[in-house]
Image: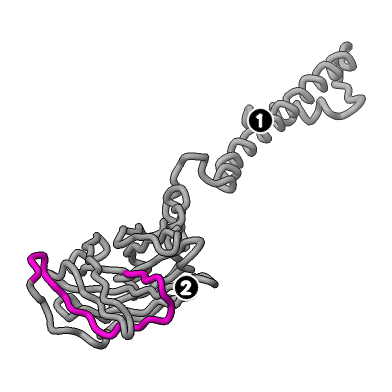
Amino acid sequence: MTPEDDVLRESLRDLIPGYRAAGDPFARVTASVRRRRARRRILLALGSAASVALIAAVPTLVGLAGPLAGQRAGPSRDGGPSQTGPPASPAKPAPLFPVAHGRVDGARWSVGSTRFSDQARRCLYAHDKVIFNRATWCFDDWQPGQPVTWGMVDALRPGAEVTAVFGVASEPVRYLEVQFAGGPQQRVYTAQTRTDPQARFFALVLGAPGRHVQSMASFAADGTAVDTIVVQPAAGQPCAPGPDLLCASPPR
């Protein structure tokens, strides 16, 4: 029999009520003391076991709580996406670069170039309180080196009695002479922007509604004619910006 067996036997014996050892005059007192000691040993053993179980459970609880604030989570075990930092901020609207501005019938207008998406990379856009209502025209079918082209803009505010033209030209065109059918000839200057450095954009607003472009002649900075007179636009299309369209959302 081992010493451990003696300790266990003694502890169990001490727990038996009224146990009296043979020939022991102080058996009752000794048994009571031994029972109290045995209870303390059992309580201490139970307390130690509970502490070990709680410590073992802590990592599991921390794992369920997730990473602490400011920490990065590692790759997920199931191969799915895992958080590697704070959520990405919403995409910012594309910048709008100035192309042309002016005043007509006491109202100011301005037009800029921008990029809405991979399918709408070369666009002119205007929006104000009097004349333009999210007017957008994209020239992605036009390629640098081709003759000047344009579009007649009809995205106007109710009551805006104007004719608006958006267009694009190649280098080295610096200005154009625009001839309106049944109306005057207007000069308009081109502008190069960061939207497409190979293109030169232009915009014209005439204080008379219902005019149509009859022809355009393009000139270099020194007044030399660049192309033959163009009578029909080559490429370009209006676009109504929106979340479900290629134009996406207009700049704010």
Query: Mark 2: which amino acid?
Result: Glu
**Label 1: how many Cα within 10 Å (few below 14, some 14–19, many 20+):** few
> Measuring 18% from the left and 81% from the top, which residue is drawn there?
147
Front of the two marks 1 and 2: 2
> How much space separates mark 1 and mark 2, taking CA atoms?
90 Å
Q: Quadrant of the C terminus?
A: bottom left
Q: Quadrant of residue 224?
A: bottom left
Q: Which residue is mark 2?
A: 161
> In the figure, 234 relative to 165: above or below?
below
Q: To which residue does mark 1 refer?
A: 48
Q: Is residue 234 above or below residue 199?
A: below
Mark 1 secondary-structure assignment: helix
Q: Residue at x 86, y 29 (%)?
A: 16
Q: Is residue 71 above or below residue 157?
A: above
x and y, in percent, of residue 128 in the image: 47, 61
Q: Nearer the viewer, residue 140 or 11?
A: 140
Q: Amino acid at mark 1?
A: Ser
Tell which residue pokes out farthest to the top in this image.
25
Q: Which residues are magenta?
A: 204-223
Q: Compared to 124, does 27 lie above or below?
A: above
Q: Which SS class for mark 2?
A: loop
Which residue of the protein is positioned furthest toward the bottom in this rendering? 232
Q: Residue at x 44, y 64 (%)?
A: 105
Q: Earlier in the sequence, mark 1 or mark 2?
A: 1
Q: Is residue 52 visible?
A: yes
Q: Tell me residue 89's x, y (percent).
A: 45, 52
